[in-house]
Image: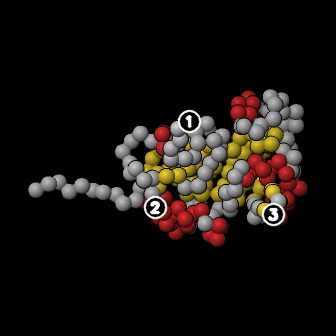
């Protein structure tokens, strides 16, 4: 008798996305997040949503179309939390503007977002200068210091957080996704590494 093959219909992976890699399944010119996945996995997996090339952090990769839709559908309003470093001093007025919902383009007003100021460094740290690799970052000087913030949004428009800060006259120089729904980035996961979701992570995500 042959040995039965265990065949997973659905696979779920968490990746700590590195900078400089695009969120796509394949690309002729640029390295994609799936290029980083050399192990055994289903060929039909794909990233849930997009992180910009310069953005790092939590990325869910699966072939579960229902879960993908549940997490991305605008009507479900799934929270996504990011850590950002911003050139300039983020103020309480900015917090209020984010809470009201910013107009970021003609005819599109972002949903209210929770902006929290974590720290302000008048004299930027060495890491802040490294973070200037962001494609839309200002020059190598940060005369107005750097504010570290967290922000929770429920949408994922193209460059949304960067564009929201541009509306307040500031530039994002570093952006990292910390969570999506009930799934939090495993901070022990090395940059560029990935692993299957645990049963409890998957359950929490589906209960969302």
Q: Earlier in the sequence, mark 1 or mark 2?
A: 1
- The C terminus lies in which quarter of the figure? bottom right
Q: Position of residue 154 (x, y in %)?
A: 68, 62
> Relative to the observer, which residue lies in front, 40 or 205?
40
Q: Residues within 10 Å of mark 1 (few under 14, many from 20)?
A: few
Q: Residues within 10 Å of mark 3 (few under 14, many from 20)?
A: few
Q: Earlier in the sequence, mark 1 or mark 3?
A: 1
Relative to 153, is 33 on the left or the right?
A: left
Residue farthest along the front direction in this orientation: 28
Distance of label 3 from label 2 (alpha carbons): 33 Å
The image quadrant that residue 173 belongs to is: top right
Q: Position of residue 142 (x, y in %)?
A: 84, 33
Distance of label 1 from label 2 (alpha carbons): 27 Å
Numbered badge on residue 29? 1
At 64% from the left and 71% from the top, the residue drawn is 75
Question: Mark 2 sits on what residue?
Answer: 64
Relative to 58, is 124 on the left or the right?
A: right
Q: Secondary structure at mark 2?
A: loop
Distance of label 1 from label 3 (alpha carbons): 34 Å
Question: Mark 3 sits on what residue?
Answer: 107
At 61% from the left and 38% from the top, the residue drawn is 19
> Does any portion of residue 187 appear in the rendered image?
no
At 27% from the left and 56% from the top, the residue drawn is 6
Residue farthest along the left direction in this orientation: 1
Q: Nearer the viewer, mark 3 or mark 2?
A: 3
- The N terminus lies in which quarter of the figure? bottom left
């Amino acid at each position: 008798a042959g040995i039965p093959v265990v065949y997973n219909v659905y696979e779920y992976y968490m990746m700590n996305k590195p900078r400089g890699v695009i969120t796509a399944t394949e690309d002729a010119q640029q390295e994609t997040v799936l290029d980083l996945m050399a192990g055994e996995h289903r060929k039909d997996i794909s990233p849930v949503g997009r992180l910009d090339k310069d953005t790092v952090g939590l990325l869910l990769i699966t072939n579960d179309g229902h879960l993908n839709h549940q997490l991305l559908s605008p009507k479900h309003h799934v929270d996504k939390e990011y850590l950002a470093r911003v050139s300039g001093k983020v103020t309480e007025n900015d917090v209020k503007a984010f809470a009201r919902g910013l107009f970021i383009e003609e005819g599109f007003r972002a949903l209210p977002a929770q902006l929290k100021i974590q720290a302000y460094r008048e004299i930027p740290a060495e890491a802040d200068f490294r973070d200037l690799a962001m494609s839309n970052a200002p020059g190598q000087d940060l005369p107005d210091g750097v504010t570290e913030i967290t922000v929770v949004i429920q949408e994922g428009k193209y460059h949304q957080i960067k564009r929201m800060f541009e509306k307040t006259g500031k530039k994002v120089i570093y952006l990292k996704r910390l969570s999506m729904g009930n799934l939090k980035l495993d901070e022990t996961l090395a940059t560029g590494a990935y692993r299957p979701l645990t049963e409890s992570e998957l359950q929490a995500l589906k209960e969302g």
